[in-house]
Image (cartoon, rainbow, N blue to C red):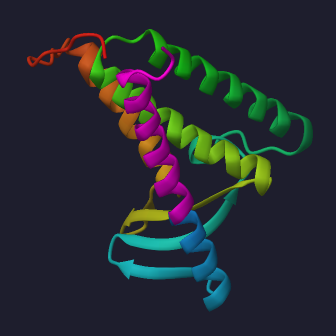
Amino acid sequence: MLLNKKTLFSGIIIFIAFFLDRISKILILNFFSNNQLDDYYVNSFLNLILIWNQGIAFGLFQSESFFYHFLSIVIAIVIAFIIYLIYISKKKYEIFFYGLITGGAIGNLFDRLYFGAVPDFIDLHYKNFHWFTFNVSDICITIGIIGILIFDLFKLEITHNEKNT
């Protein structure tokens, strides 16, 4: 049966990550277009600023034309591979974290295909030090990667029942 608990669980996680990303980007794009602002001061360590990213995570490998399209294809292949990892995974935490990564990656790939760039808008900073501007998809991907690393590096085991889902 194609629709089992694992498929349903991973699908829900992917959908939630994608949905939160889409909603946040729609709200930000509407906010900046309606208010015609360059940036918005939230507090002493957070600004909202709209930057169109043609690279990958945190603006790395900014490029145009061929390399941009090549990166989009590579991202789609990586998404397919992560979906395969979800399929073969037997651990709920892996399915959860791979789902976050997949949902976030699909969110950014959607923007690459629809807009030709990814809107990044969260600007964390301390005094004059600014972290890379990022979005909700990047948060999902980062949490997913960190979660997988923590569980795998420290060999953490979930103590409750972890049968095939």
Q: Residue furthest left?
A: 159
Q: State the residue in front, 141 or 164.
A: 164
Residue situated furthest bottom in the rendering:
35
Question: Would residue 120 be found to the left or right of residue 112 on screen?
Answer: left
What residue range appears in magenta?
1-23
State how many labels appear. 0
Residue 121 in view (yes/no): no
| Quadrant into which the C terminus falls | top left
Does residue 74 appear anywhere in the picture? yes
Q: Given the current orientation, which residue lies at the most extreme right position?
A: 65
Q: Residue drawn 68% across and 42% down?
A: 109
Is 106 colored magenta in this rendering? no
Please state if 76 lies on the left or on the right of 24 as rendered: right
Q: Position of residue 121 (x, y in %)?
A: 54, 65
Relative height, residue 119 to residue 94 (above, below): below
Give residue 116's position: percent from left, percent from top. Answer: 80, 53
Q: Residue at x 43, y 43 (%)?
A: 140
Q: Residue furthest front?
A: 1
x and y percent of residue 26 in the render? 59, 69
| Residue ID at (86%, 45%) | 64
- Classified by dominant secondary structure, the portion drawn in magenta counts as helix
Q: Is residue 69 above or below residue 53?
A: above
Give the residue displayed 84% in from the left and 36% down from the top: 69
Image spot of residue 56 (x, y percent): 65, 41
Nearest the eye: 43 or 146? 146
In magenta segment, residue 14: yes
Q: Using residue 96 as the reference point, say whether residue 151 is left or right of it.
A: left
- The answer to which image quadrant residue 106 occupies is top right
The quarter holding residue 162 reads: top left
